[in-house]
Amino acid sequence: MGMTTVDSGEAPPGMLGQIEVDERTWWQRSNEAFSLRSAGAVYALILLVGFFTIRTAQLGRGNYLAAGNVGNVLEQSSLIGIMAIGMTVLLISGNFDLSVASNAAMSAMAAAMMVDTVGPAWAVVIAVAVGTVGGLINGLIHWYVGLNSFIVTLGTLTAYRGLVLYMNNGEERLIATREYRETLKSWAGGFVGSVEVALLVAIGFIIAAGVFAAGRQRGLAVGSGVVAAAALIVTVATDYRVRIAHQTFYLFILLALVWFVLRFTVTGRRLYATGGNMEAARAAGIVVARYRVVPFILVGFCAGVAGVMFLSRVGTVPPSMLTARELEVIASAIIGGVALTGGSGSVIKSMIGALLLFVMTNGFTIIGLSPFLQEIAIGALVILSAALYVVASRRAAAAGRV
């Protein structure tokens, strides 16, 4: 199958002590990278954007790809995208978290209640800490009590939402100090400057160079570099400047960090191994408990960050904050091709899945489609995405490639 194994010397003899060396040609690796199974969400996003661009032009409602609208879509998808990063890691480990949105609301409420006393900086720390502890509780109950993650997080979904209501007697909580509201808003709701944009571009090129240097999916790396360079040229030539909100900037930073860990580190390989076959991972010397609990903590951390971003944008926490939005988080990962059975997935593809959801919602609103039809379309998209992945996996298995 074009793959050989060599001793990595990084672990005890067994599965983790050997690494796979990809002997396929550049063309074969590129074909796999751009196959429908690997890049289906990307193709769907391109088709959807193309449709809305044409349709809005026909209706005379302006350019769908106008810089302002692109910036809006990125900002709107940021909260779900941040939580989807943690959810993807958890799904790779073989579990999922239904309480992520309630945890984010609980974190935001904790920050809103404390900010007027301790100030914005400590309120942010408190929010992230509350979310992280909420994730830790889920992980400890799941692993040490032995309950299925569905049961655990179904319970904490209700419990955390109940805490949100209890903390402020079911009422909306407003940041009373105007100065603190403006400070938080500037941290998350403001727009990045030229230095931060340069950092994002640099990160993009570093990722492309890293993929190329590792000899994995070189076609994708080269393509990423070309797209980045073309974007810079178009920006300079046409003055097309997308205003990137700070919360979108934080999303990109978190996305890059988690992607790097999953793809290029031993920790990432062990996480995939644990999610794919827990018993084999244990036999290979992996501390399985660590790779089953820590992903819950990461989801909680992302929930805390999302809670801070929400509070910073609006300056208040309604008791219904992010109700049922955990479904969008999980849907983003599924649309991105993450397997619910564990052992496979990509945070970048999950981000593309989140973009798909918000491009669809944004586009349907602009062209005047009924919100009820929007819900039907999103549900169909989730089912079709999951079905596409399953069918493609079965065909690959039948062909002897997996």
Image (cartoon, grey):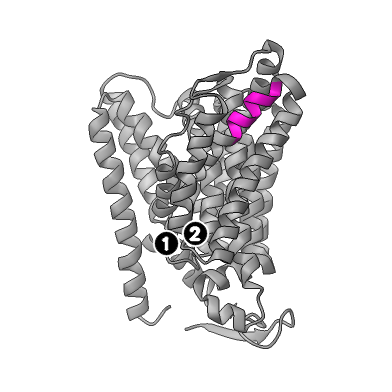
What's the amino acid at mark 2?
Leu
Element class at badge 1 = loop
Residue 313 is situated, as x and y percent measured from the top left of the image, at 57, 23
Q: Is residue 168 above or below residue 127?
A: above
Label 1 neighbour load within 10 Å: few <14, some 14-19, many 20+: many
Q: Is residue 21 above or below residue 306?
A: below
Q: Nearer the viewer, residue 62 or 254?
A: 254
Q: Magenta stretch: residue 113 in it?
A: yes
Residue at which label 2 appears: 91
Q: Quadrant of the C terminus?
A: bottom left
Q: Nearer the viewer, residue 139 or 401?
A: 139
Q: Is residue 20 visible?
A: no
Q: Which residues are magenta?
A: 107-115
Element class at badge 2 = helix
What's the amino acid at mark 1?
Leu
Q: Is residue 188 above or below residue 90?
A: above
| Spatial CA span between label 1 and label 2 | 6 Å
Label 2 neighbour load within 10 Å: few <14, some 14-19, many 20+: many
Residue 143 is situated, as x and y percent measured from the top left of the image, at 57, 65
